[in-house]
């Protein structure tokens, strides 16, 4: 699982290898994020750091605002070790 948060304008290169493929049991799972403080609980969190945590719930589908652009890899040959 990964998340990117930009402080300034940027681009992210996320190399997926092997690529997601439901037929080969490499599914991509998306999550909804909820503020940690939105649910009661007794987990121990350092004072003032609860905004660093979130509850995740698996989504049924990809987010509506998801943008993925594919490109052909033209670098050196990748080999399995």
Image: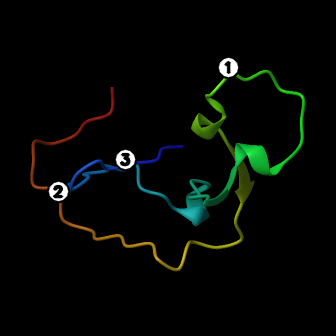
Q: Nearer the viewer, residue 44 or 47?
A: 47
Q: Earlier in the sequence, mark 3 or mark 1?
A: 3
Density class for disc 1 (Cα within 10 Å; few <14, some 14-19, many ≥20) is few
Disc 1 from disc 2: Cα separation: 43 Å
**Label 3 with label 2: CB-CB less than 8 Å:** no
First in residue order: circle 1 vs circle 2: 1
Instruction: Using the rendered view, name the quadrant where residue 28 is placed.
Output: bottom right
Indicate the position of residue 78 as horizontal and vertical percent values: 22, 40
Expressed as whole percent of the image width and height from the top left, the position of residue 1 reads 54, 43
Question: Which one is closest to the eye, mark 1 or mark 2?
Answer: 1
Q: In the drawing, does residue 4 fall left or right of residue 79?
A: right
Distance, label 3 to label 1, CA atoms, is: 36 Å
In-image side of 29 versus 69 (left or right): right
Q: In 3D space, how far apart are the residues under numbered discs 3 and 2 (Cα atoms)?
A: 11 Å
Res. 70 image quadrant: bottom left
- Quick check: 78 above or below 62? above
Q: Earlier in the sequence, mark 3 or mark 2?
A: 3
Q: Which residue is mark 3?
A: 17
- Report the residue at 84% width, 48% height from top: 39
Q: Which residue is mark 1?
A: 46
Give the residue displayed 64% in from the left and 73% down from the top.
61
Q: Secondary structure at mark 2?
A: loop
Q: Position of residue 37 (x, y in %)?
A: 75, 44
How far across and down, in percent of the image, does residue 57 sit?
74, 56
Q: Residues within 10 Å of mark 3 (few under 14, many from 20)?
A: few
Pick out the residue farthest to the left.
75
Q: Secondary structure at mark 1?
A: loop
Q: Residue furthest front?
A: 48
Label 2: which residue? 73
Foreground disc of the pair 3, 1 = 1
């Amino acid at each position: 699982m990964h998340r990117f948060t930009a402080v300034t304008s940027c681009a992210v290169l996320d190399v997926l290898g092997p690529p997601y493929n439901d037929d080969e049991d490499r599914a991509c799972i998306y999550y909804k994020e909820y503020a940690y403080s939105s649910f009661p609980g007794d987990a121990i969190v350092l004072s003032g750091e609860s905004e660093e945590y979130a509850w995740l719930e698996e989504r049924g589908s990809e987010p509506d605002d998801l943008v993925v652009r594919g490109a052909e890899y033209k670098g050196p040959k990748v080999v399995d070790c």
